[in-house]
Image (spheres, rainbow, N blue to C red):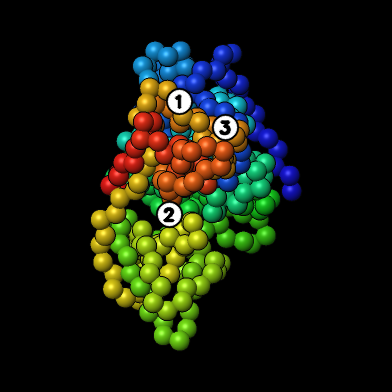
Amino acid sequence: MTVKKPTMVNKTPAKISKYIAGGIRSRTTKIAWHYTGLHDVKGINTINNWFNSINRGEQGNRYASAHFVMDLDGTIYEYVPMKRIAWTTNSANYYSIGIECATTGTNDHYSDKEYVSMVKLGAWLAQYYGLDPRKDFIRHTDVVGRAYKICPKYFVDHEDKWNQFKLDCYNYLKGKLTEKNIRNCTNGKGNSIVSSGTTTSQPSVKETACNKVGYVNVPNSTLNVRKGPGTTYDKLGSLKDNTKVEIKAICDNGWCKIVYDGNYGYVKESYLDGIEEVQSVRKMIKNISNSPINIREVADWDADAIAELQPGQSVTYADGPLVAANGSTKMYKTISNTYITASTKYVKIVEVKL
């Protein structure tokens, strides 16, 4: 099945400044979801009163934008062109599409019309970039950590609804879910209805976020890692005995959400030993200069710049300083496998508590 591109309203400024967009993105591996921050405020207001003001340089040295903005009436607004980098998801800006969604109610859920549009847009983007909504959709909080920002609030507060939304997008992408059968899982009216007797979701499970480590305890065997908290979910892979794992949430059905192969997976808690809290920090490379700094795809000073790190902005550190080709100055490697100068004149390493 081919997913039809949903109707969109183009709101891209005639003149795009550095404050809302960077250069051409070299790859797209994630779709990042956000919320606009104030419930019952129209999405078009976010564009007119905030993004456009930033674009005109009226917010000082502020950088912020999104590729798409969802409104409560279901309207999808295009803002930053899809091929360019939008300043929306911190270090994930360089490999993701960013979507801001208006919300309603004190718990910041989504309207019925908006939810339908979110599913349609999500499925179409997944098709366009060859992604799987179940593992390639991320929340802003997944990138920066809960201590830094809770975004999008409803989907961070309700892990089961976040999983349901991703599943709705997947089922719509695969033709198992029609538009008329999409049900807004965030308003308490139930889940979407899929065809051919398939089910839309696994049993609801509450997840309590944490920051712990543990060790696999399966002597002479391996521990299965699954896509969800239960044996009915597909298997992602397996872990050997005594493997150290990062635990990001404890489920109320006896499972744990862990970091696995760059994403998240789930394992049975009873097969983990030595679980304990950790105080972890994330190293960031911060631009301390007054000018944008080029980000390159390879550690080579003659390589073309694929993006810019704006003054005051940071990207997640991965390695370095490393020797770079065609120059004496070393480079840092970022978590998105890009490279930036390691000169202390322009950048410094800072630690952010998670």
Mark 2 or mark 1, earlier in chain: 2
Q: Position of residue 353 (x, y in %)?
A: 28, 47
Would you place residue 164 above or below residue 75 in this image?
below
- Let me know if residue 45 appears in the view: no
Crowding at mark 3 (Cα within 10 Å: few <14, some 14-19, many 20+)? some
Disc 2 secondary structure class:
helix
Q: Position of residue 225 (x, y in %)?
A: 49, 69
Marker disc for residue 292: 1
Q: Label 1 sits on what residue type?
A: Pro
Name which of mark 1 and mark 3 comes first in the sequence: 1
Tell me the distance, in whole angstroms, between the alpha carbons under discs 1 and 3. 11 Å
Instruction: Calculate the distance from the C-alpha at mark 3 to the C-alpha at mark 2.
Output: 40 Å
Please state if 27 lies on the left or on the right of 53 as rendered.
right
Quarter of the rendering containing residue 273 = bottom left
> Total label count?
3
Asked whether 324 or 62 is in front, the reply is 324
- Tags 2 and 1 in contact by the CB under 8 Å rule? no
- Residue 214 location (% of width, % of height): 33, 69
Q: Residues within 10 Å of mark 2 (few under 14, many from 20)?
A: some
Q: Are marks 1 and 3 in contact (CB under 8 Å)?
A: no
Q: Which residue is mark 3?
A: 305
The local secondary structure at tag 3 comes to strand
Q: Residue at x 43, y 60 (%)?
A: 259
Q: Is residue 61 above or below residue 288?
A: above
Residue type at mark 3? Answer: Ala
**Dot 1: what SS?**
loop
